[in-house]
């Protein structure tokens, strides 16, 4: 995200392709979307990235990274 | 530390040269002029998604886009993007294209209204100049015609 020039960007630290949460979790979908939209008025200049502070796993585990890496390499 | 996507994308690009990320020739910036609860919002998605009765995207260089009805009741979404990460979002496109969540935000009056149409196109295109000079302006015109105040791009 930091390599491109978006006017406004929020960072959601989820696996790519799961931006708004796990499948069928409508509450989480809505929470993340609401937080992203609520950030919009806070931007004052282009190129800024605001971190929403989202974590994929409730315990902070990063195990999903290995799974995602394998998925991206296996299926491409 | 955030997950490093670019090394994997480079590996996946072979035997083609690694992808080159380009910056637009003009930095886009439009001031926000309305409160969120008075703003009309649209979604943009690079997942090459569409309604089931719309023509499929043709990987990998399809520069077209689809107008997707914002009402979730209109019908299910299909994701045509070729990315290997598609297994999960193809089962539940709402996790990359939150039509239902946006509708709920409108019903809660957190946003003013929803654009009647959202828009989707193929992410990962290598024809950067055509994206900037053809695809992006076309999408801009669509958003202006729909009187959209805020367009939220969800990258894929």
Image (tube, rainbow, N blue to C red):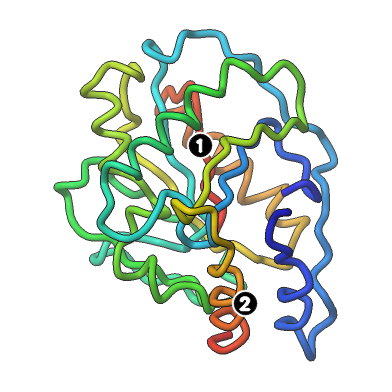
Query: What number is the disc on residue B57?
Result: none
Say what secondary structure mark 2 lies in: helix
Q: Are marks 1 and 2 on the same chain?
A: no
Which residue shows up at 77% across the image and 41% down it? A5
Which residue shows up at 49% across the image and 71% down it? B81
Q: Could you tell me which chain the residue with mark 1 belongs to?
A: B
**Residue designated by label 2:** A69
Relative side of A55 to B124, left or right: left
Residue extending furthest toward the left: B73
**Quarter residue B83 falls in:** bottom right
**Quarter residue A23 falls in:** bottom left
At which x and y percent is residue B71?
A: 22, 41
Confirm or deny contact between disc 1 and disc 2 (CB under 8 A). Answer: no
| Depth order, front residue of B129/B99 | B99
Relative side of B130 to A3, left or right: left
At which x and y percent is residue B18?
A: 83, 76
**Residue designated by label 1:** B152
**Quarter residue B113 falls in:** top left
């Amino acid at each position: 995200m930091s390599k491109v020039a978006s006017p406004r960007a929020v960072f959601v630290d989820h696996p790519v392709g799961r931006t708004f949460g796990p499948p069928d979790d409508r509450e989480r979908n809505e929470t993340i979307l609401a937080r992203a939209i609520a950030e919009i008025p806070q931007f004052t200049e282009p190129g800024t990235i605001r971190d929403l502070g989202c974590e994929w796993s409730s315990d902070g585990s990063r195990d999903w990274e290995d799974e995602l890496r394998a998925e991206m390499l296996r299926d491409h | 530390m955030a997950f490093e996507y670019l090394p994997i994308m480079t590996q996946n690009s072979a035997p083609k040269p690694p992808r080159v990320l380009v910056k637009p020739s003009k930095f886009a910036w439009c001031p926000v002029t309305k409160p969120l609860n008075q703003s009309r919002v649209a979604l943009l998605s690079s997942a090459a998604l569409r309604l089931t009765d719309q023509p499929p995207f043709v990987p990998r260089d399809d520069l077209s886009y689809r107008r997707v009805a914002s009402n979730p009741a209109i019908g299910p979404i299909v994701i045509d993007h070729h990315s290997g990460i598609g297994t999960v979002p193809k089962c539940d496109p709402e996790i990359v294209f939150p039509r239902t969540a946006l509708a709920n935000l409108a019903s809660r009056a957190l946003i003013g209204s929803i654009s009647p149409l959202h828009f989707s196109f193929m992410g990962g295109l290598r024809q950067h100049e055509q994206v900037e000079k053809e695809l992006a302006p076309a999408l801009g015109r669509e958003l202006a015609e729909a009187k959209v105040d805020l367009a939220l791009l969800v990258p894929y």
